[in-house]
Image (cartoon, rainbow, N blue to C red):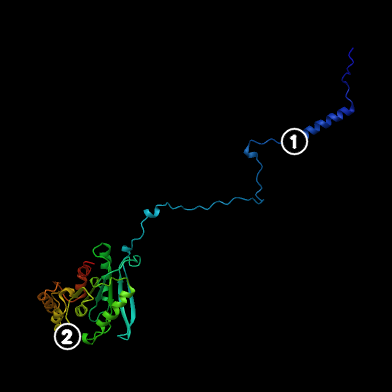
């Protein structure tokens, strides 16, 4: 007969209590462990009332392609045109201010290493130095320079404030002895004679001839448009032509209208140049002594002055 003790068939009160306690413990442990939900809708929501540290969104930067500046053309200074300035300085000769306008060609401000020829243009009797601009000087030059018809050059427009007889006037002296050095000192000019010219219309033409002969060492070209020679200079022409070395004489351009009352005076001057074998161009056009006449021939004037510049 086996001596093992048999499992009691009757449950004692202490055994029942112990078993109940174990069951409760296991139930509590099972409630505290929650499985990870596979459904996003069952995730715990974020409390938006709490401070949340969020990394700032980097600013968006427009990155320009490296070659975009090469693709997009910059403004061409030639198409911008030239500029006109009005300037004055004190003249010791006149003991007052002397005024002039100056045309600076396109790209003058940006092409700081470039130097330019200079043309001095004189206005007519009873007019002022706005006259050449009114005739279309700036517009014509801008277009001719941009299209490559002429090389860029500077134009100086002196103001003759008083119309005294030339033998009593200091205008020519101031232009040569004060204005010209002032221009060369303050602007990028080519100071050689080859790159300097003077011209004028009507009274300005007479001044140009006088100054061109008296200062032949300074000017290489003289333009005389609708020329009425100063009466006091008529007798000096042959003297000047004789005294000035032939190789030093400037080139001359003379033109006048058929209806101009001074056309015979201009023709006589051209004939004297012919007789002395002085290089010049002579034109007898239609029409008379008027701004419409000068404006009509302005392009031809400018092209002649700029030749070989």
Q: Quadrant of residue 286?
A: bottom left
Callout 1 crowding tier (Cα within 10 Å): few <14, some 14–19, many ≥20 = few
Observer-nearest residue: 176 or 283?
176
Residue 178 in view: yes
Say what secondary structure mark 1 lies in.
Answer: helix
Report the quarter where the C terminus lies: bottom left
Residue 285 appears in the figure: no
**Outermost residue toward the left?**
275
Residue at left offset 31%, top offset 79%? 99
Residue positioned 26% across, 82% down in the render: 173
Quadrant in the picture for residue 7: top right
Q: Where is residue 234 shown, x and y percent of the image?
A: 14, 83
Indicate left or right for 4 with 67 as reference. right
Within 10 Å of disc 2 (Cα), the crowding (few <14, some 14-19, many 20+) is: few
Between 164 and 191, the one nearer to me in the picture: 191
Q: Secondary structure at mark 2?
A: helix
| Distance CA(mark 1)–CA(mark 2) | 130 Å
Q: Which residue is mark 1?
A: 31
| Residues tagged 1 and 2 counted as in contact (Cβ below 8 A) | no
Instruction: Pick out the residue farthest to the top.
Output: 1
Which tag is nearer the camera, tag 1 or tag 2? 2
Query: Residue 298 location in percent, x, y?
Result: 21, 70
Label drawn at residue 232: 2
Q: Give the x, y percent position of residue 109.
A: 35, 67
Q: In the image, residue 76 lies at what x, y percent?
A: 33, 61
């Amino acid at each position: 007969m086996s001596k093992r003790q048999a499992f009691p068939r009757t449950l004692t009160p202490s055994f029942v209590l112990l078993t109940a306690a174990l069951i409760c413990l296991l139930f509590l442990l099972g409630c505290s462990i929650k499985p990870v939900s596979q459904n996003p809708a069952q995730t715990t929501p974020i409390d938006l009332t709490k401070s949340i540290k969020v990394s700032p969104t980097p600013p968006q930067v427009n990155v320009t392609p490296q070659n975009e500046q090469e693709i997009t053309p910059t403004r061409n200074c030639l198409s911008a045109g030239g500029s006109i300035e009005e300037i004055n300085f004190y003249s010791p000769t006149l003991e007052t201010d002397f005024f002039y306008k100056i045309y600076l060609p396109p790209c003058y401000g940006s092409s700081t290493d470039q130097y330019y020829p200079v043309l001095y243009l004189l206005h007519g009797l009873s007019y002022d130095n706005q006259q050449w601009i009114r005739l279309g000087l700036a517009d014509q030059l801008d277009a001719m320079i941009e299209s490559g018809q002429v090389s860029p050059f500077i134009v100086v427009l002196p103001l003759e404030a008083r119309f005294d007889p030339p033998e009593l006037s200091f205008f020519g002296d101031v232009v040569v002895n004060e204005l010209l050095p002032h221009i060369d000192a303050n602007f990028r000019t080519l100071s050689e004679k080859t790159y300097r010219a003077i011209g004028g219309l009507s009274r300005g033409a007479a001044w140009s001839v006088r100054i061109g002969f008296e200062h032949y060492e300074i000017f290489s070209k003289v333009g005389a448009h609708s020329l009425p020679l100063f009466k006091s200079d008529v007798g000096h022409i042959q003297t000047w032509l004789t005294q000035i070395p032939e190789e030093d004489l400037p080139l001359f351009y003379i033109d006048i209208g058929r209806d101009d009352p001074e056309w015979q005076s201009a023709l006589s001057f051209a004939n004297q140049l012919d007789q002395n074998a002085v290089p010049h161009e002579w034109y007898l056009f239609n029409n008379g002594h008027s701004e419409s006449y000068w404006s009509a021939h302005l392009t031809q004037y400018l092209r002649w002055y700029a030749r070989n510049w």
